[in-house]
Structure formats: C-alpha cells, structure tokens
C-alpha cells in the first residue's frame, strides 16, 4: 500500500512538471533557433530507517534536443542562420558570454550589433560596432562588412566578425533565460570552421505534433495516478471496516 501511494502521489506531481516542460516547448514552437527541452520520469527509492517500501518518482531533465531546426530564406541582410552545428556568441544580461542559434540581428541606437531581443552580439574582440549610414553585409564566415549608403564599393570596410563557437553538447547547459552556457563556466573558443547562411533564419526544432501527443499522454498518465490514489483510499477504508468487524 505504501509503495502504491508514494509512487502515485509523486508520479502525479512530477507528471505536472513534465507537462510544464512540454508546454514550454510548445510555446516556443515559433521561436527562432529554439532547442526543445527533454524531460523524463524515473523512480528513486527512499533511503532511511522505516522507509524500505517507499519509492519516489522524480522528474529529471536529461538535456536538450540539439537537432537543427528548419532554415527559411528571409532576404533580410541582418538575418543569419548557423549552418550545421555551432552557436552565435552573445552577451547575456548578467554580463557573461552565452550562446544562441537565433540569428535575427539588428543595430541598436548606440550602433552595436545585437539580437532582436536585445542581446549584444560578440565578435572576436568583444561587441561589434556598426558605422552609421551604412549597409551591412554578413559573409558566411561571420565577417561583417559595411557599405556606405551611396554604394561606393571602394569604401567597403570590415567592421568585425561574429564569434562562432562549437563546444561539445555535453559541455553546454541551458539557463533559465533560454541561452546556453559552458557548464564549467568561462567562454568557448571561436571555431573558424562554422559557416553562416546569410539572409536566412533557423526555426525552432520543436515537433508540434509530437508535443501535442505527449501532452495527451501525460494527461492520461496523471488521470491514472489519481485513480491509483483513489483506489488506495478505498482499499484502506475497506480494510478498516474488516478490522472493526474482527475487533
């Protein structure tokens, strides 16, 4: 009885957490460069005096799905998609270096290159400053060139190069802000082998149909666990009645 109650109780709780993960993935199905979060349930025995029959169910997050998302051509000069494996280095709000696949870029009021959600894009030497009244061209290797508004090709200048990195997936950890960082801290080394697809954006790698099926499965699983608790309550009630009759 103890084992059933503990498994059903903690299973119902962690199923709700699992649903929250799937719901978070679904809400980011249209977020550029989003990586789906993976989640799994596992049983953990309770250790201690008087607890050999009790087992908890816990929700574990084994990591993220690093499968590349679909790439769509946009025609916008400041849109870039990482081709294959790799990441764009940005400066997180806390000042640390973080990594994203969202290549929708813009130039802010201070002339700094940043993502659409306001994160400063890092170059090989720090933030990238863009001259005023120029058109920006991003090459496949991340090099950024500025062309004057009058299209004078003899005045084309290289203003920087986007820092592209490709650390091992096992070394990356997802933050609460959705950005990835090195698990051991610090910054990853730039990788010159990574290439970009200009005027394109990578979509989310969330499979909407699969996520919806998971939501339905989890809802049924939660229902089953609640019924187990109800059965345990009924069994305990009947057992008490039998004991009272024998008293």
Image (cartoon, rainbow, N blue to C red):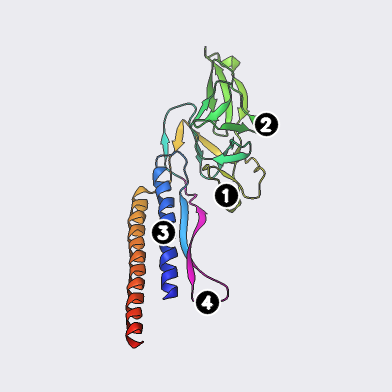
Point 55% across, 29% down: residue: 114
Q: Which residues are magenta?
A: 43-68
Q: Is residue 63 magenta?
A: yes
Q: CA distance from mark 4 to mark 1?
A: 35 Å
Proximity of marks 2 and 4: CB atoms separated by less than 8 Å? no
Q: Can you give x and y, in whole percent of width and height, for residue 202 in the image?
A: 45, 39
Whether the residues at callouts 3 and 1 have beta carbons within 8 Å, the answer is: no
| Image position of 78 (left or right of 216) | right
Graded by Cα atoms within 10 Å as few (under 14), some (14 to 19) or many (20 or more), the crowding at tag 3 reads many
According to the picture, the residue beneath numbered tag 1 turns out to be 173
Q: For marks 2 and 4, give the one nearer the viewer.
A: 4
Q: Tally the numbered discs.
A: 4
Secondary structure, mark 2, is loop
Residue in the foreground of this view, choosing between 134 and 18: 18
Report which residue position mark 4 lands on: 52
Query: In whole angstroms, how far apart are the C-alphas of marks 2 and 1?
Result: 24 Å
Mark toward the start of the polypeptide (4 vs 1): 4
Label 1 SS: strand
Q: Earlier in the sequence, mark 3 or mark 2?
A: 3
Q: Residue tagged by mark 3? A: 15
Q: Quadrant of residue 95?
A: top right
Task: Give the crowd class for mark 1: few <14, some 14-19, many >=20 residues within 10 Å.
Answer: some
The alpha-carbon separation of the residues under discs 2 and 4 comes to 58 Å
Q: Earlier in the sequence, mark 2 or mark 1?
A: 2
Q: What residue sits right under mark 2 in the picture?
A: 125
CB contact under 8 Å: marks 4 and 1: no
Quadrant where the N terminus is found in the figure? bottom left
Residue 29: percent from left, percent from top: 40, 43
Closer mark to the observer between disc 4 and disc 3: 4
Q: Is residue 113 magenta?
A: no
The first of marks 2 and 4 along the sequence is 4
**Residue at (52% x, 57% y) in the render:** 62
């Amino acid at each position: 009885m103890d084992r059933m109650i503990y498994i059903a109780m903690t299973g119902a709780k962690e199923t709700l957490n699992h649903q929250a993960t799937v719901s978070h993935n679904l809400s980011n199905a249209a977020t550029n460069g989003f990586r789906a979060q993976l989640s799994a349930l596992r049983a953990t025995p309770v250790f201690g005096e008087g607890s050999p029959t009790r087992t908890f169910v816990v929700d574990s997050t084994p990591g993220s799905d690093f499968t590349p998302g679909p790439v769509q051509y946009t025609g916008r000069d400041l849109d870039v998609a990482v081709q294959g494996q790799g990441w764009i280095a940005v400066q997180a709000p806390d000042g640390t270096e973080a990594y994203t696949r969202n290549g929708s870029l813009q130039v802010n009021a201070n002339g700094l290159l940043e993502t659409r959600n306001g994160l400063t894009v890092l170059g090989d030497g720090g933030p990238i400053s863009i001259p005023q009244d120029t058109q920006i061209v991003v090459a496949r290797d991340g090099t950024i060139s500025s062309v004057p508004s009058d299209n004078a090709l003899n005045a084309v200048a290289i203003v920087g190069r986007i820092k592209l990195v490709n650390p091992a997936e096992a070394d990356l950890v997802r933050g609460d802000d959705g950005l990835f960082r090195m698990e051991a801290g610090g910054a990853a080394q730039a990788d010159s082998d990574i290439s970009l697809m200009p005027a394109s954006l990578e979509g989310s790698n969330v499979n909407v149909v699969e996520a919806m099926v998971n939501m339905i499965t989890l809802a049924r699983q939660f229902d089953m666990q609640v019924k187990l608790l109800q059965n345990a309550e009924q069994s305990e009630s009947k057992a008490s009645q039998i004991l009272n009759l024998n008293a």
